[in-house]
Image (cartoon, grey):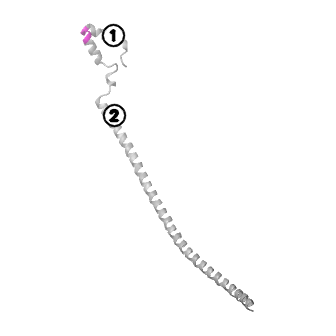
Amino acid sequence: MPASELKRLMLRNRLIEILGEEEAEILMDSLPPVYWHDLATKKDIRASEDRLRTEMDGKFAEINGRFTEMVGKFAAFAAEVRGEFANVYAEFKTLRAENKEFRGEMALQFAKQTRTMVFTMLALAVPTWASILAVGLA
């Protein structure tokens, strides 16, 4: 257990008697208020640093593994999305072709309908006009 302040003061006073005030101050300043074995040495600090570095390397490896896993999942998702877009684009092209075919069919049907209406109107108009002319000439 660390020396109490009272014991340190008693030691300082005794040192002043033996060594003198300046030397006693120098010696007291060099003595820590704790046990020597409680102080960390360079070796202790290096060991802590190595332990921390090993821990951090493990954490970074774990994070890197998770990141790599996420990149793989994202690449798979992106490939799936590209595939789906390719399917949608293919369906769109098919619908566009069908629409073009439908438009052509509609144009043909409108042309047939128009021809039918024109010939029907002519079929009705010619006898009507002929009758009017016949009545008017007679």
Q: Nearer the viewer, residue 69 or 101?
A: 101
Q: Residue furthest bottom?
A: 138
Q: Nearer the viewer, residue 85 or 30?
A: 85
Circle 1: element type? helix
Quadrant occupied by the N terminus: top left
Residue stretch in magenta: 18-22
Q: Against 115, is 82 above or below?
A: above
**Magenta stretch holds residue 7:** no
Residue holding disc 2: 48
Where is residue 121? Give x, y as percent: 67, 83
Circle 2: element type? helix
Q: Against 90, is 20 above or below?
A: above
Dominant secondary structure of the residues highlighted in magenta in the image = helix
What separation in Å lies between label 2 and label 1 (alpha carbons)? 37 Å
Left/right placement of residue 29 relative to residue 99 reads left
Quadrant occupied by the C terminus: bottom right
Q: Amino acid at mark 1?
A: Met
Which residue is found at the position 30% from the left and 18% from the top?
31
Which residue is found at the position 47% from the left and 59% from the top?
81
Q: Residue furthest top?
A: 17
Determine whether label 2 and label 1 are within 8 Å by CB. Answer: no
Which residue is found at the position 46% from the left and 57% from the top?
77
Q: Nearer the viewer, residue 83 or 63?
A: 83
Q: Nearer the viewer, residue 121 or 43?
A: 121
Where is residue 41? Give x, y as percent: 30, 28
Mark 2 is surrounded, within 10 Å at the Cα level, by few (under 14), some (14 to 19) or many (20 or more) other residues, namely few
2 or 1: tag closer to the N-terminus? 1
Where is residue 108? Give x, y as percent: 58, 79
Which residue is found at the position 75% from the left and 89% from the top?
135
Residue holding disc 1: 10
